[in-house]
Structure formats: C-alpha cells, structure tokens
C-alpha cells in the first residue's frame, strides 16, 4: 500500500512543485512588466508636467522683462521730473528771497 501511495503522491507532488515554480516565475515576470509599465507612465507624466512648467516659466520670464522695461522707463521719467522740480524749487526760492529783500528795503525806506 505504501508503494501505491507513493505512486499517487510522487507525481502529484512533482506536478505541484512545477506548477508552483512556473507560477512564481510568471508572477515575477508580470510584476516586473507592471513595474516597468508604471515607471514608464510616471516618467511620461513627469515629462509632460515638466514641459508645462518650463512653458510657464518662459512666459513669466517674458512678462518680467516687459514689466522691468516699463518700470525702468517710468523710473527714469520720474527721476527727471524730480530733478526738474528741484531746479524749479531752487529758482523760486531764490526769487522769493529777492522779493523779500526788496520788500525789506521798501519797508525800511518808508
């Protein structure tokens, strides 16, 4: 009876081990393929996001250059206005001092 049992058990055991090994190898292969597929998808998504961000950065840099040019022109204009007004203020101050001196002379002479 033990021989009959081994005759039934041994082929079943060998078949089971072969099936287990094949399934394990298949699972490893499927897992590797899935990992590669996921990594590829993630990299493609990364590239897509990176290109989008690069385009946004380029647009922002262009807008910054436009604003910089605009404000540099405005600063130059207002600096020239300040200088002109300082000169005008100095001229008016000198005229006021001269008028006050003349007024003092007229009051002193009366």
Image (cartoon, rainbow, N blue to C red):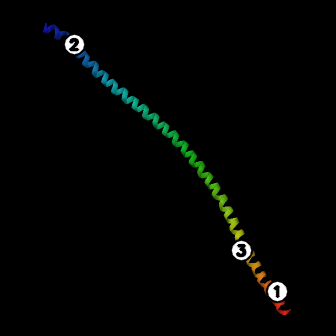
Q: Write down the quadrant of residue 55 in the picture.
A: top right
Q: Residue furthest left?
A: 2
Q: CA distance from mark 3 to mark 1?
A: 25 Å
Nearer-the-camera pick, 62 or 75: 75
Q: Residue at x 53, y 42 (%)?
A: 51
Reading the image, the residue beneath label 2 is 11
Q: CA distance from mark 3 to mark 2?
A: 109 Å
Front of the two marks 3 and 1: 1
Nearer-the-camera pick, 84 or 60: 84
Q: Earlier in the sequence, mark 1 or mark 2?
A: 2
Query: How far across and down, in percent of the image, does residue 8 sit?
Result: 20, 9
Secondary structure under tag 3 reads helix
Question: Where the C terminus falls, by quadrant?
Answer: bottom right
Left or right: where does residue 102 sit relative to residue 63? right
Left or right: where does residue 52 sit relative to residue 96? left
Front of the two marks 3 and 2: 3
């Amino acid at each position: 009876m033990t021989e009959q049992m081994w005759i039934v058990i041994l082929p079943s055991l060998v078949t089971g081990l072969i099936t287990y090994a094949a399934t394990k190898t298949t699972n490893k292969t499927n897992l590797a393929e899935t990992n590669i597929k996921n990594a590829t998808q993630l990299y493609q998504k990364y590239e897509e996001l990176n290109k989008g961000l690069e385009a946004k950065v380029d647009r922002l840099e262009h807008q910054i250059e436009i604003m910089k040019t605009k404000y540099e022109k405005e600063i130059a204009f207002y600096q020239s206005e300040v200088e002109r007004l300082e000169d005008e203020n100095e001229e008016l101050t000198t005229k006021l001092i001269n008028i006050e001196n003349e007024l003092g002379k007229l009051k002193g002479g009366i």
